[in-house]
Amino acid sequence: MKIDIERLSHAFVSADGDEKKVIKDFSLAIPSGALVRVLGRSGTGKSTLFNIVSGMIVPNSGVVKVGDVDITTLSESARDLFRSKSVGYIFQTFNLLPSLSALENVYVPLLLAGHETENMKKKAGELLKQLGLGAHQTHFPWELSVGQRQRVAVARILLQRPALLIADEPTASLDKDSSQDVKNAIIEMHKQGSTILLASHDPIFDDMVGEFSCNMEKGGE
Ligand SMILES: Nc1ncnc2c1ncn2[C@@H]1O[C@H](COP(=O)(O)OP(=O)(O)OP(=O)(O)O)[C@@H](O)[C@H]1O
Ligand SMILES: [Mg+2]
């Protein structure tokens, strides 16, 4: 899935009414299947950019074409549909549903979003085994460590195979082994052809700069 961002600008208005421009006249063309490392210090707008590209925030101005559609022109429900069909998100909080087991957390949200249903449960179990969680399939999120919860979220993404994967600090607070699992999953998704946007301060990803990167310093100017 290709992404074309043209002249994107976005500002937040603080509680005291001040306007803070976070993204200023930012343009970027990302070919389908590219892995993009988004760089920049804390507060330079990386997460804001991701929230715009995934349709969670409507920007003040600019064009954000994902595939062939400018998602800034879509209704809220159309943006929700786009997100549930095409976007996978890995971030620090994993969005696990507390009332579902690890196994159910991998495939039930995808069923609810209307994804392909054949063998989903079986494939979900296989992915959990690959990620070292074979013995934890029936456990609920509160019975899992942080790294184990992260891997359940990663299994869901691998099962979903989203056209666009957004990884926003995906290894924050993980140990080295869990971080490597997450990195491997991202590499796997890249091989399968997903377009990937990655922002991370973790040196584990340092060898993944190069192919394509953009810097959000000075709001992407
Ligand atoms: N909902 C919001 N309301 C007001 N200001 C916001 C909001 N979200 C983000 N900001 C501000 O926008 C700026 C960019 O934030 P953003 O989260 O995009 O940065 P980031 O590059 O992802 O930083 P980090 O590396 O720390 O994750 C920050 O100054 C932040 O305070
Ligand atoms: Mg961020």
Image: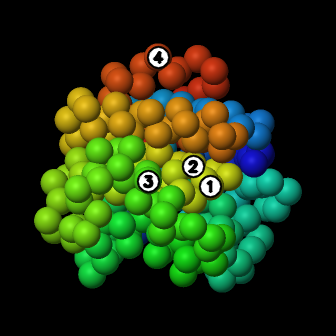
Do the residues under discs 2 and 3 have CB atoms within 8 angstroms? no
User: Which residue is the site of mark 3?
Assistant: 126
Using the numbered discs, state the Cα–Cα distance from disc 4 to disc 3 in whole angstroms.
29 Å
Front label number (1 vs 4): 1
Q: Secondary structure at mark 1?
A: loop
Q: Quadrant of residue 40?
A: top left
Q: Position of residue 211 (x, y in %)?
A: 63, 21
Which of the two labelled residues, at mark 4 and mark 2, occupies the earlier sequence position? 2
Q: Nearer the viewer, mark 2 or mark 3?
A: 3
- In the rendered image, which residue does mark 4 sit on? 207
Queried on whether the Cβ of the residue with tag 1 lies below 8 angstroms from ligand 2, the answer reads no
Three-letter code for the amino acid on which mark 1 is drawn: Pro
Report the amino acid beneath label 4: Asp
In which quadrant of the rendered view does residue 221 lie?
A: top right
Dot 1 and dot 2 residues touching (CB under 8 Å): yes
Comparing 81 with 129, the one in front is 129
**Does any atom of ligand 2 lie closer than 8 Å to the CB of label 3?**
no
Asked which secondary structure carries label 3, the reply is helix
Farthest residue toward the right? Answer: 68
The residue where tag 1 is placed is 162
Residue corresponding to mark 2? 165
Distance from label 2 to label 3 (Cα)?
21 Å
Q: Residues within 10 Å of mark 2 (few under 14, many from 20)?
A: many
Q: Residue at x 29, y 53 (%)?
A: 134
Q: Secondary structure at mark 4?
A: helix
**Badge 3 amino acid:** Glu
Mark 2: amino acid: Leu
Does the beta carbon at disc 2 come under 8 Å from ligand 2?
Answer: no
Marks 1 and 4, how far apart in space?
23 Å
**Which residue is depicted at the point 39% across and 44% down?**
130
